[in-house]
Image (tube, rainbow, N blue to C red):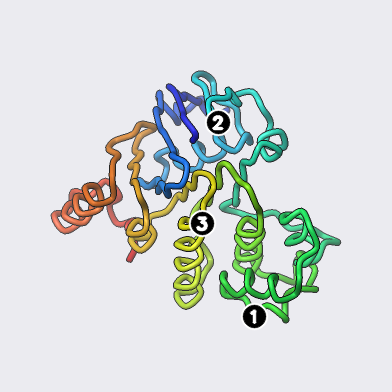
């Protein structure tokens, strides 16, 4: 379980981005964080992963204070983060990344399964270098596959995984998230505006203007968002996607 207590952060430009966020992401549950662009969702994900340190507040991982740990130190403790804009790795192949993530040699069949879950024709990609020869969308899918390959994660964060992915591949990704949720040993958190991702959530958290506007079980929050969308008062505005 991951608990955030009174997390606040101001950007280098002086903008107050997060304003006392309280949030719990439960083990074995899928929590989806949504809200309007600029509301602080990605900043929150970066703080949870260790890329950015909060100005105040603390982060507990299974009761342990990890607020001051780096992204590398948190990764060793079981925190995984799929970037919204993935990094290119010159000199490494897709096979290399999958095996590094899994911590072991992988059978080609297993790699094909992982890549197939994110909509890639696996055998065409396994030995390709993760560099400029791959599109942004392809690299995004490869990174999600590496996160799916990891084992014994205490917290897995996906930041807008649907970005750059076509509708056919997105359907497979939903299936992968559903399977990941059913087998989860840790907590899962996805940042998304996609209704289909909201629909598989256990809990939904809406963040706007740096604060938690509303949170709770999807059976309560999702109908509320859909009703607000129809009335034109949805906190996601035009950003909610079907």
Q: Is residue 212 above or below residue 170?
A: above
Which image quadrant is residue 114 in? bottom right
Q: Position of residue 22 (x, y in %)?
A: 39, 28
Q: Give me the residue at 79% from left, 58% from top.
A: 104
Residue that numbered label 3 is attached to: 183
- Disc nearest the viewer among 3 and 1: 3
Measure the C-alpha gap from mark 3 to mark 1. 25 Å
Q: Is residue 100 left or right of residue 36?
A: right
Q: CA distance from mark 1 to mark 2?
A: 36 Å
Image coords of residue 127 (percent x, y): 80, 73
Along the polypeptide, which appears first: circle 3 or circle 1? 1
Q: Which mark is residue 80?
A: none
Residue at mark 2 to residue at mark 3: CA–CA distance: 19 Å
Q: Position of residue 236 (x, y in %)?
A: 30, 50
Return the residue nearer the eye: 69 or 112.
112
Number of dots carrying numbers: 3
Determine the residue positioned at 57% across, 28% down: 12
Ranked by sequence position, the earlier of labels 1 and 2 is 2
Locate the C terminus by quadrant: bottom left
**Residue that numbered label 2 is attached to:** 61
Outermost right residue: 91
When the figure is inspected, residue 115 is found, relative to residue 48, above or below; the finding is: below
Which residue reaches farthest left? 231
Say few, some or many: other residues with alpha carbon within 10 Å of mark 2 (under 14 / 14 to 19 / 20 or more): many
Mark 1 — residue? 121
Residue sitting at the far top: 56
In the displayed structure, does residue 76 sit left or right of residue 206? Answer: right
Please name whichever residue, 136 or 186, is drawn nearer the observer in this view of the structure.
Answer: 186
Q: x, y percentage for residue 61?
A: 55, 31
């Amino acid at each position: 379980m991951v608990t955030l207590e009174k997390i606040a952060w101001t950007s280098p430009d002086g903008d107050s981005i997060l304003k006392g966020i309280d949030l719990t992401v439960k083990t074995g549950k899928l929590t989806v964080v949504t809200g309007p662009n600029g509301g602080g969702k990605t900043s929150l994900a970066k703080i949870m992963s260790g890329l950015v340190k909060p100005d105040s507040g603390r982060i507990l991982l299974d009761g342990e204070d990890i607020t001051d740990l780096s992204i590398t130190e948190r990764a060793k403790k079981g925190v995984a983060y799929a970037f919204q804009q993935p990094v290119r790795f010159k000199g490494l192949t897709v096979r290399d990344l999958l095996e590094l993530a899994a911590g072991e040699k992988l059978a080609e069949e297993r790699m094909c399964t992982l890549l197939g879950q994110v909509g890639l024709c696996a055998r065409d990609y396994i030995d390709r270098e993760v560099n400029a020869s791959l599109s942004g969308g392809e690299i995004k899918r490869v990174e999600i596959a590496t996160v799916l390959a990891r084992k014994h994660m205490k917290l897995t964060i996906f930041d807008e995984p649907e970005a750059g992915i076509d509708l056919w591949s997105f359907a497979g990704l939903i299936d992968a998230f559903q399977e990941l949720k059913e087998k989860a040993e840790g907590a899962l958190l996805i940042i998304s505006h996609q209704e289909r991702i909201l629909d598989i959530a256990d809990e939904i958290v809406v963040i706007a203007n740096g604060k938690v506007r509303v949170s709770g079980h999807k059976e309560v929050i999702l109908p509320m968002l859909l009703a607000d969308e129809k009335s034109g008062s949805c906190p996601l505005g035009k950003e909610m996607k079907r």
